[in-house]
Amino acid sequence: VQLQASGGGLAQAGGSLRLSCAASGRTFSNSAVGWFRQAPGKERELVSAILWSGVRTYYADSVKGRFTISSDNAKNTVYLQMNSLKPEDTAVYYCAESPGNTGTYDYWGQGTQVTVSS
């Protein structure tokens, strides 16, 4: 599986961005795709995750109510809609896949930079 993340950019506080994670190769409905982020000087954190089937999602407390994760199986793409952005959302965002939703993410895409100005 290869993952391609896109959609980052510059937004003002309160604005929105949508990230996309396109997967090539085989995907399975019981595998999970997660969006992680890493800000300078901070550890990488899991922001949100979804099963390819779309039946289960996870959100970090810091993004609940602001971010929405979704999957489009026909396009093998997972989206992260980010609304009400805050400067503290500034980070490099990565998507990754956990085969079988084991909690271990084996496949990673390249990062996409999200910068939120105040």
Image (cartoon, rainbow, N blue to C red):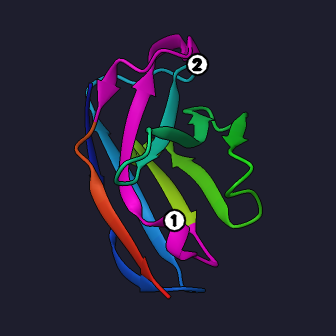
The span shown in magenta is 82-108
Residue that numbered label 2 is attached to = 30
Q: Secondary structure at mark 2?
A: loop
Look at label 1 and name its amino acid: Asp
**Between marks 1 and 2 in the image, the one whose residue lies nearer the viewer:** 1
Is 23 situated left or right of 36 in this image?
A: left
Is residue 6 visible in the rendered image? The answer is no
Is residue 86 on the magenta stretch? yes
Q: Position of residue 44 (x, y in %)?
A: 44, 39
Q: Which quadrant of the view contains residue 95?
A: top left
Q: Is residue 49 above or below residue 16?
A: above
Is residue 83 on the magenta stretch? yes
Give the camera-side residue of 82 and 55: 82
Residue at horizontal 64 percent and vertical 62 percent from the top: 67
Look at label 2 and name its amino acid: Asn
Residue that numbered label 1 is attached to = 89
Residue at horizontal 46 percent and vertical 15 percent from the top: 99
Q: Which quadrant of the view contains residue 54?
A: top right
- Whether residues under marks 1 and 2 lie with C-beta atoms below 8 angstroms apart, the answer is no
